[in-house]
Image: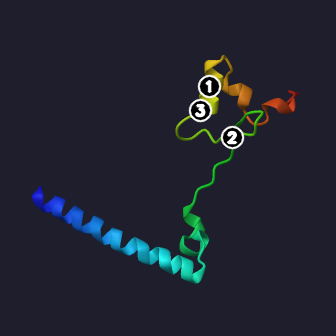
Amino acid sequence: MKRRLEDAMTEASAAEEIIPLIKQAIARFGLEPEDLFDGDNTETTTALYRDANGNTWGGRGRRPTWLSEALALGKTLEDFQVGAALGKTSK
């Protein structure tokens, strides 16, 4: 247990030393996140729910405060579904 703690502390110390160097390199070379990270690793989410103020939620992760508050006031998820207010008609 003591050895694992020492290893973790050593790793944290190394990270503290390297972060300023990385920041300097980013500033020096004018790098952007897209330059450092492959775009294939990012996942985009389409908005499934939207309110009148333009707040959106993709339906994943923790429910946002604006939606939780609206649900507490009696609204339903269906009230915020993207496309629900577009007047969909059935054939």
Q: Which residue is mark 3?
A: 65
What kind of element bears circle 3?
Answer: helix
Q: CA distance from mark 3 to mark 1?
A: 6 Å
* Label 3 crowd (10 A; few <14 / some 14-19 / many >=20): few
Q: Is residue 86 above or below residue 47?
A: above
- Residue at 75% over, 40% down: 54
Place residue 88 in its image quadrant. top right
Where does the image place residue 56, in percent across and percent down from the top left? Answer: 68, 40
Q: In the image, 71: left or right of 80?
A: left
> Viewer-proximal residue, 6 or 84?
6
Could you say where residue 89 lies in the image, as x and y percent from the top left? 87, 28
**Does the CB distance between marks 3 and 1 fall below 8 Å?**
yes
Q: Residues within 10 Å of mark 2 (few under 14, many from 20)?
A: some
Q: Residue 43 versus residue 11: which sits nearer the camera?
A: 11
Q: Quadrant of the N terminus?
A: bottom left
The type of residue carrying mark 2 is Thr
Residue type beneath disc 3: Thr
Disc 1 element: helix
